Image: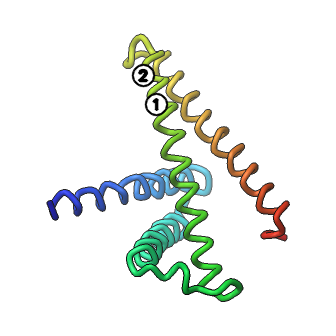
Amino acid sequence: MRLRHRARRWRSIVPIALFAALLAVIQLASLGRVTLLPVKTVVVALLLMAVSRLVMRVGALPRISPGTPAWRLLLFALVTRHFVGILRAETARALRAWSLAAPRRLGPLAWRSLAWAMAAIVVRSWVRAERFYAAQRLRGLTA
């Protein structure tokens, strides 16, 4: 049972590491060098995972008062967790639709349709993020 829990924890880190690696490749291709951004991405993601697990495990959510730095960190962690869930759901939907629609998965057209499916994930996630930000702004939570 503990082994399965550890495997699940490592599986949650794999997408973050792949994203950071892709970010490094993009930087290398465009800038000719890699900055610290991929490393910072992994560090922030790991910190947020730790904070959200700690808060949920300890039950500190009701004890944190609004306006404090801990409150801001908690809100950042919860919003980030929310968007990771959105990205996970959108990715699952797009890849499921692609697997059902692509007649052959190993041809040039299949790779092109996969690229369009990935682009659709970015667009759909962007639209959902804009809606979330607009709702927060209407409620006066952002400037």
Q: Residue reaching furthest front?
A: 62
Name the quarter where the C terminus is drawn: bottom right
Position of 57 with respect to 77 (left or right) is: left
Identify which residue, 102 or 59, lies in the foreground.
59
Q: Residue at x 46, y 30 (%)?
A: 95
Q: CA distance from mark 1 to mark 2?
A: 6 Å
Q: Is residue 112 left or right of residue 139?
A: left
The residue under label 2 is which amino acid type? Ser
Q: Are marks 1 and 2 in contact (CB under 8 Å)?
A: yes
In this rendering, position of residue 122 left or right of residue 21: right
Q: Residue 62 at x, y = what percent?
A: 55, 81
* Residue 134, position as x, y percentages in the image: 80, 55
Question: Could you say where residue 111 lies in the image, as x and y percent from the top left?
Answer: 47, 23
**Residue 127's x, y, as percent?**
71, 43
Measured along the vertical axis of the image, is residue 101 above or below residue 133? above
Tell me the colour scheme of the image. rainbow
Residue shown at 54%/39% (left/top)? 90
Which dot marks residue 95? 1
Q: Which residue is mark 2?
A: 99
Mark 1 Cα-neighbour bin, 10 Å: few <14, some 14–19, many ≥20:
some
The residue depicted at 16 percent of the width and 64 percent of the height is 2
